Image (cartoon, rainbow, N blue to C red):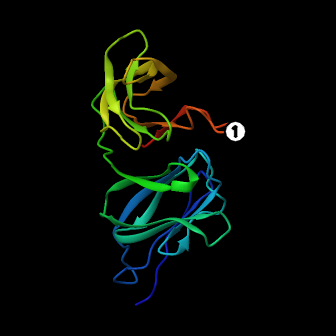
Amino acid sequence: MKKKFLLGVLAAGFVAVGMIGCKKDDETPAQARVLVTHASPDAPGVDLLVDDTRVNTAPLTFPNNTGYLPVNAGTRNIKVNAAGTSTTVINANLNLEAGKNYSVFAVNRLANLEAVVLQDDLTTPATGQAHVRVVHLSPDAPAVNIGVQGSSANLFSNIVFKGSTAFTPVAAGSYNLEVRVASNGAVALTVPATLEAGKIYTVFARGFLAPPTGNTNALAASVIVNN
């Protein structure tokens, strides 16, 4: 049996390496897709390894992501190493289903770095709708609600650190989203967002509410377009 590797150049400069496991020379192995995001506000750049094969050509830095990497389905070992070293800070075995999409977030402070793994439902939104998911990845921020500026109603409620919502239909349009402290409703962050019909978005809160000395990664939000 020959080993077959599938290579694809990503817009972010990463190389997706297909994993070993095809049954025939002319048969493409069943694959999943994995998107990795660096969301640890005090961690340096990292390297990504799938089954001990490095899949990035430059360090992945906060708060960037790889885009979706095609990876052979099955149980895959995912490692996150300090860039340019063999020091592993996250080591996880993921069971990836063929045809499914996953997001892996490297989160928390460097001293407690860990992975949050989510399955991504990329079902096409209904006409005139976008789908939005919110993920709370600020390690020192309290539970939050998400609402639209000018309305006291919440789109999402009581999202705790490392918590996430489902992808939720929202009418396409331009909004000022507010990140509100769940306990008292105080607005911690305002996020301008333009949602296009048919698009799927992940909005993640990242950075420190109170950055430690020398760290400039204050509380902010990033948006990933998942389709």
Residue 59 visible to the viewer: yes
Q: What residue type is labelled 1?
A: Thr
Q: Is residue 211 above or below residue 187?
A: below
In this picture, is 215 found above or below 25?
Answer: above
- Taking depth in this image into account, of 75 and 174 the one nearest to the observer is 75
| Horizontal and vertical percent position of residue 134 | 39, 35
Q: Nearer the viewer, residue 98 or 128?
A: 98
Can residue 128 be seen at all in this image of the molecule? no
- Residue 58 occupies which quadrant of the picture? bottom right
Q: Which residue is drawn at 64% across and 55% down?
A: 45
**Viewer-side residue, 220 vs 110:** 110
Looking at the image, residue 197 lies above or below residue 65: above
| Mark 1 surroundings: few (<14), some (14-19) or many (≥20) residues within 10 A | few
Residue 78: image location, x then y, percent: 46, 67
Q: In which quarter of the image is the N terminus?
A: bottom left
Report the residue at 43% width, 57% height from top: 34
Q: Which residue is drawn at 68% across and 36% down?
A: 216
Helix, strand or loop status at disc 1:
loop
Locate the C terminus and report the quarter of the image it occupies.
top left
Which quarter of the figure has residue 181? top left
- Please give the residue where the numbered disc 1 appears in the rendered image: 213
Name of the residue lying farthest toward the right: 214
Q: Nearer the viewer, residue 38 or 35?
A: 38
Residue under the point 51% across and 55% down:
112
Q: How many marks?
A: 1
Of all residues, the one furthest to the top in this rendering is 150
Q: Where's residue 145, x and y in %?
A: 37, 25
Q: Where is residue 168 in the image (x, y as percent from the top left)?
A: 30, 32
